[in-house]
Amino acid sequence: MQQLRTGLLVAALFLAVAFVSRSLASSVTETMPVWLGSGVTFSALLISPRWRWPAILAGVWLGSVIWGMVAHGLSPAGAAAFASIEVVSGAMGCWVASLGRNDPDTPAGMALFLCGAALASCLGGALAMALWQWQRPGLNLTLEGVAWVLSTMVGILLLTPVVTAFRGFHLQLSGGMPMMQFLGGGAAFLLFLCAVALVFIDHSGERYGQVAATLAYLPMPFLLIAAALWGPRGGAVALLLGGLLIIGRTAHGGGPFAVAEGFSGEAVIEVQGFVTIWAAVMIAVRALSDGRRQALVDAQAWRLRYERIMREVGVATVEYEAATGHATWGMGADKVLGEDVAHISSLDEWLERIEPDERGLVEATWSSVASGETWASEQSYTVVQSDGERLRVRERLACVRGADDEVEMVVGMLRPEPLENGNG
C-alpha cells in the first residue's frame, strides 16, 4: 500500500506540474517550452532510495500516459510509448546523477547532476523524434527533437534544485539569514523583475531597434546576485521563478528572442537554450561557492577541536616562518603560557623572554631545525614574563618541508614544567 500511495502521489504531482507548464507558455511544437514534468521525475528519483524507484517510475508512467492522451491526443499505444520515453530517459539520467550519492550542492554532485540532466534530455529527445515520426509524420522532427531536449533540460535545472534544497526543511523562527542579506536579495530580485518587464515586452524590436537582441542579458546579473544572497533555497526559488517568467514572456511573443524568427518556434528554442545556460551557470557557481564555504567551515571546526584539546591538556602550539622567524601562536596559547604570548609575534621577541644563560642554546637549536640540519629537537628552558614571574617550559620543535624539500615552517609544542630547586 505504501508503494501504491507513492506511485499515485507522483502521478498526481506529475499531472499538476504538466498543467502548470501548459498554462505558463504555449508553443508551435508538440513539446512545451518548459516541461516541469521531467523535473518531478528527476527530483523524486534523486531524493529517494533506489528501492523506491519502481513505485516512482510507475507513477511517472501513469501520469505520462494520461497526459499523452489528454494533451497530445495520442492513442493508448502512442501514450504508452510517450510515457516510456519519460520513464527510461529520466531513470537513466538520474542513475548517472546519483552515482556516489553525492549532494547536488557539492562540486562533484553538481557535475554528476548536470551530466545526468543532459543524458536524460538528449536520450528523451532522440526517442521523441522516433515517437513523433510514428504518431505525427507531418511534424518537423528536428525541431521537435531539439525542443524536447531543451524543454526537458530546463524543467530539470529549474525544478530539481528547489526540491533538493528544501529536502529536510524545517521552519525556524530564528537562526535564518540576516535581515540585511534577505533585503539585499529581495532588492536584487525586484530589479530583475523590473528588467524583465522592460526587456521582455511585446514588440520589443519596435521599441529598442537593433539593440533589442543584446538586452536579453540585462536582467540576468540581478538574478545571479539575488540567488547568491538568498543562499541555496532562496536562490533555487529565484531561479525557478525567473526562468519561468522569461520563457513564458517569450512564448507569448514578447522579448528580444521574438523580434525575428527564421522559422516558427525559433524564439522558444532560443530562450530555452538561454535559460538552460544561465541555470547551469548558476547551479555550478552555487555548488562551487557552497563547497568552498563548507570546506572553510570544516577546516575551522577541526582547528577549533584541535586547539581545544591542546589547551585542555596544557600544551601551547606555535608556528614560525623559517625564513623570517615570524611567529603565529595557536588559539589558547595564552591560557597555557600567560597573556604575554599574545603580544609576541617573532622568534626574536620570544628569545628576549628566555633566561640569558639559556638563550644562546635555544636559538642555536631553533636555527638547526629551521635550516634542516636537524629534523626535530626537544629541550627545556626558563621564560621570564613581563611581571617578573619565571616559567619553565619544555619545547619540542619540528621542521615542515615544502614541495622543493626546503624547510618552510618550524612548528613547536610547549608545555609548562615545574621550576627547578623547588621554586615551581
Image: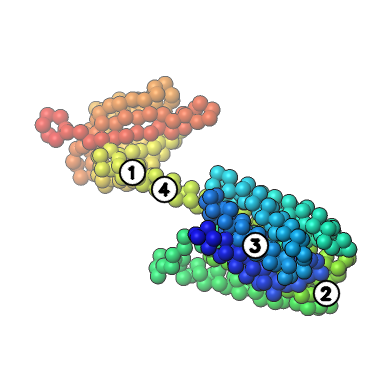
Question: In the image, what residue occupies the spot 35% across and 38% down?
Answer: 318
Q: How many marks?
A: 4
Q: Is residue 387 left or right of residue 173?
A: left
Task: Check contact, mark 4 vs mark 1: CB within 8 A.
Answer: no
The three-letter code of the residue at mark 2 reads: Gly
Q: Which mark is residue 205?
A: 2
Q: Which mark is residue 307?
A: 1
As drawn, which residue projects farthest toward the top?
373
Give the SS element for disc 4.
helix
Q: Residues within 10 Å of mark 1 (few under 14, many from 20)?
A: some
Question: In the image, what residue occupies the spot 33% across and 38% down?
Answer: 317
Q: Which mark is residue 221?
A: none
- Compare residues 259 and 370 and report the one nearer the observer: 259
Residue labelled with disc 4: 300
Q: CA distance from mark 4 to mark 1?
A: 10 Å
The three-letter code of the residue at mark 1 reads: Glu
Question: In the image, what residue occupies the spot 50% across and 69% down?
Answer: 182
